[in-house]
Amino acid sequence: MVSFCTRERGLVQAVAQGIGKPGSSLAPAVELFTHSTLFLAEARGADRLTQCRVIEPFYALRRDMARYGYAAVACELIVRTTEPGQLVPGMFEMLVSYLRAMEATEHPRVLSWAFELAYLELSGIGPVIDRCPACGKVGPGGVYVASHGGTLCPNCAPGDPSALVISPGTARTIGAMRCFDPDAIARLRLADPTRHQVQRLIRDHIRYHLDLNLKSEQFVEGVGRWRPPPRRPRVEEDASGGVSDDE
Ligand SMILES: [Zn+2]
């Protein structure tokens, strides 16, 4: 059983028989992140994949661990928040343009945040960042409170020192990111405080409003932290913390 994100029918789950056999004509379309034309035989229970024609294989996404992770973030978000047959207009086109841009971008993290923000917006649950969701006061940014779904103005915000403050600049950057124009996103440069605010807002918002912790996000964070193991040193510390010569 394979899940496909389709233009006409939203998420489709179909049986792809014999894909493990050598020379299977269906195997290329079942590779992760592949853009194909599918021929499905409709059946009660689950459709059956009968033929396919690959349009864009997006090989580069399967060769690079980080890009693989970022591509998976978008797919996992769709698969875990969409019911089979549920059509979200624009979702398919946005996913294809995301995968295409992800092959070439020098800033995959920013592109993936933009996708997540745009997807939330498309699903009608994007964070409110241009006005206060409690009193309606217009103005970018404020104190993000997940249960309010956006950034509260100073009058409505709780005095919690650990609260996430979204600066007006970050709010404008988020506004630009969620329009999801890959060329415009490629020109964005996010300073460290902005990156931190964007990342935490997306994580908190998805956790609260979709009740999700994306496994692919954890994978991406793990890849980002990974460093090659240090070469075995000539001297080793013993259990008491002292140093002894290697035998
Ligand atoms: Zn307010």
Image (spheres, helix red, strand yellow):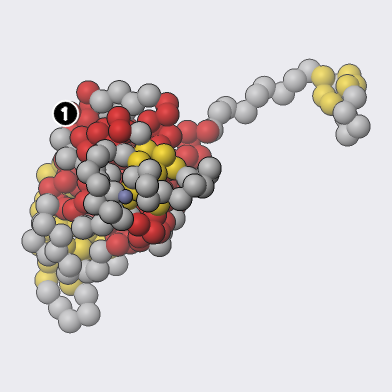
Residue 220, image x, y percentages: 43, 40
Q: Residue furthest front?
A: 155
Camera-side residue: 53 or 234?
234
List x then y, in percent, for residue 165: 41, 39
Asked whether mark 1 lies closer than 8 Å to ligand 1, one says: no
The N terminus appears in which quarter of the rendering? bottom left
x and y percent of residue 77 in the render? 31, 54
- The percent coordinates of residue 31 (x first, y second) are 27, 50
Q: Is residue 182 left or right of residue 60?
A: left
- Report the amino acid beneath label 1: Asp
Find numbered disc 1 in the image and state the secondary structure of the residue it sits on.
helix
Residue 243 vertical placement versus 88 (above, below):
above
> Which image quadrant is residue 245 in?
top right
Location of the C terminus by quadrant is top right
Q: Is residue 207 left or right of residue 34?
A: right
Q: Residues within 10 Å of mark 1 (few under 14, many from 20)?
A: few
- Residue at the extreme bottom: 44
Is residue 111 at all visible to an observer of this figure?
A: no
Nearest the camera: 149 or 114?
Answer: 149
Please give left or right for residue 189 compared with residue 161 in the image: left
Image height of 151 relative to 20, above or below? above
Residue at (17% x, 69% y) in the render: 85
* Residue at (21% x, 57% y) in the render: 123
Tell me if residue 78 can be seen: yes
From the viewer's perspective, is 183 left or right of 213? Answer: left
Q: On the image, numbered disc 1 is attached to which residue?
A: 183
The residue drawn where x is 82% and y is 24% is 236
